Image (cartoon, rainbow, N blue to C red):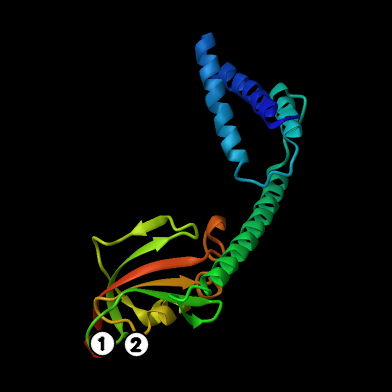
Amino acid sequence: MRLKEISILLIGVFGGFFLSKNLNHPTTKSVNEINEALGNMLYEDLQKFPSEWEFDQIAQTMHGLVNGNRAPLEKNVKDKLLLELASTKAERISSENLKAAENFLTKLSLNKQIQPVVDGKVYIEILKQGSGEKALTFNDKASVSFKQFDIKGELIKDTQTKSFIIPISRMIKGFQLGMKGAKVGEVRKIYIHPEYGFGKIGRSQESNMLLIYEISVEEIIPEDRF
């Protein structure tokens, strides 16, 4: 069964059941509109999972549950199956993100404007030179603002209107290495392999993600001023 046909079936089965339970005198228009809304909701939820399953079997199961011809799974059985499903999806996303990160860094390393800090793992790009004799070290704190980008170069976060004081020694390894030697006024971009970033920590979509930060150094705070 094709995805479009299955989506229509899901709308009709589940939407009709919902309406019969919640509307005393539904009009044709309200039935159609709510059916469509429910169908969209179900379709969007199903997209969160891998696409290997049979949508027609999902529709048949729902139809059987609605009509009382099928007993629902026990909660512990259902939860176990869905947990295994989520785990499989998380591993797939993690593997895909890691591969994409390594391919990106391999291409990046060919750019002569990019400086390797750790080959294949951490790279920096100086966008604006800083000034002053003091260079940032592992033991310093720094007042910075930053932008974060995804692997496609799209802006994820921008704190340019707000600065943060951060202790370099407590940051992820790639950030520590990437910021070493920066001076006040400097703007540098850091590209961090997942191994030197957050690895598999976080939501599944963020697992093993390449990290790209554009850091503006506003002040370096030596250890004796902590």
Q: Are marks 1 and 2 in contact (CB under 8 Å)?
A: yes
Image quarter of the C terminus:
bottom left
Check disc 1 and give the amino acid type.
Pro
Give residue 148's position: percent from left, percent from top.
39, 62
Lower sequence index among marks 1 and 2: 2
Q: Nearer the viewer, residue 56 or 109?
A: 109
Residue holding disc 1: 222
Q: Nearer the viewer, residue 207 or 213?
A: 213
Neighbours of disc 2 within 10 Å: few (<14), some (14-19), many (20+): some
Q: Residue furthest front?
A: 112
Q: Residue at x 57, y 71 (%)?
A: 106
Residue holding disc 2: 139
Tell me the distance, in whole angstroms, between the alpha carbons under discs 1 and 2: 7 Å
Is residue 67 depicted above or below 189 in this figure?
Answer: above
Check disc 2 and give the amino acid type.
Asn
Res. 129 image quadrant: bottom left
Which structural element holds mark 1? loop
